Image: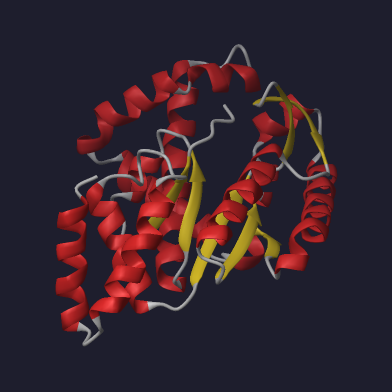
Amino acid sequence: MDWPRVQAALRQQARKQALGMEKVDSVMQILENVNSIVGPSTQARQVIVRLGYYLLSNESIKVLAPCCPDYTHVEGKYTFQGLRGGISLLAEKHISFVEKLAEIYPNVEVLFLYADHEGDDYELLASTKTSREDFATQVENSVKTTRNKVSQNGWRVEKMTDVITTLLDDETRIIEEISNDSRYTARFNSETISRMEMYRRIRRSMQVEEMKRRTIKTAAQYIALANFAHQAGYIICNHTTTNLAWYLQTDALFLHNPISVY
């Protein structure tokens, strides 16, 4: 990390905001500590500088952590062979990450959002041998179980569509926009290839065109989530995935939790 250039950018921003240079020094220390726990997607200088701007302007950090439902997993990788109602693998890992973040910057507000809309995915329902009703019940159980774990920190846990009420409409609109944009054709193809192993855990006979549609849909979900997070003043906490690059096409800030669950 080119810390002198980061500091120069923050000093310039602080002068614009009429802030003292001691604020810059404080933010620099926080950024160096945060840089030690995040993955490479956040360690890019441009991302770190934007995070620094956020810290200059805000007395607290608001973190939004999207979480998969409690799918079965083996050795830290989702198998999608069943669904339970406990704290999901990804939620557990995000909790550990934000606990480290809170040690660096105690004034952290966290909102964990369980992806309840995945209960509308017939492939996931078939793979987990779950009905839509049972899926909804298990996600609700996960929300309650996770709340019990993190409520002592003042952190919130909700279902995603309860908070982002326009999520499904936004996703549909964005799918239409990006699927017809030739600039993304090669990108969708490469991302589909990188995600094939995960897709085949869901259904071994899944065809490439089906996989590509899922890739486009997931990209749209990430963009929709990023737009909401930016508008609501949240920084997204996200695991290692090819989809992190879609955040860079939005105004959202994100913290790369360097763990893989796929």
Image quadrant where one finds the N terminus? top left
Residue plotted at (23% across, 78% down): 21
Q: Nearer the viewer, residue 73 or 170?
A: 73
Image quadrant where one finds the C terminus? top right
Instruction: Give the vertical position of 49 relative to 119 (above or below).
Output: below
> Do we see residue 160 in this rendering?
no
From the viewer's perspective, tell me whether residue 57 is left or right of residue 12.
right
The answer to which image quadrant residue 149 occupies is bottom right
Q: List x then y, in percent, for residue 23.
A: 31, 77
Residue plotted at (42% across, 53% down): 33
Residue plotted at (48% across, 37% down): 258
Q: Nearer the viewer, residue 155 or 55?
A: 55
> Do we see residue 205 in this rendering?
yes
Q: List x then y, in percent, for residue 102.
A: 57, 61
Q: List x then y, in percent, for residue 249.
A: 28, 51
Instruction: Give the vertical position of 94 relative to 228 (above or below).
Output: above
Instruction: Give the vertical position of 261 relative to 219 (above or below).
Output: above
Residue plotted at (24% across, 41% down): 181
Q: Nearer the viewer, residue 22 or 216?
A: 22
Q: List x then y, in percent, for residue 158.
A: 69, 62
From this viewpoint, which residue is outermost toward the bottom? 18
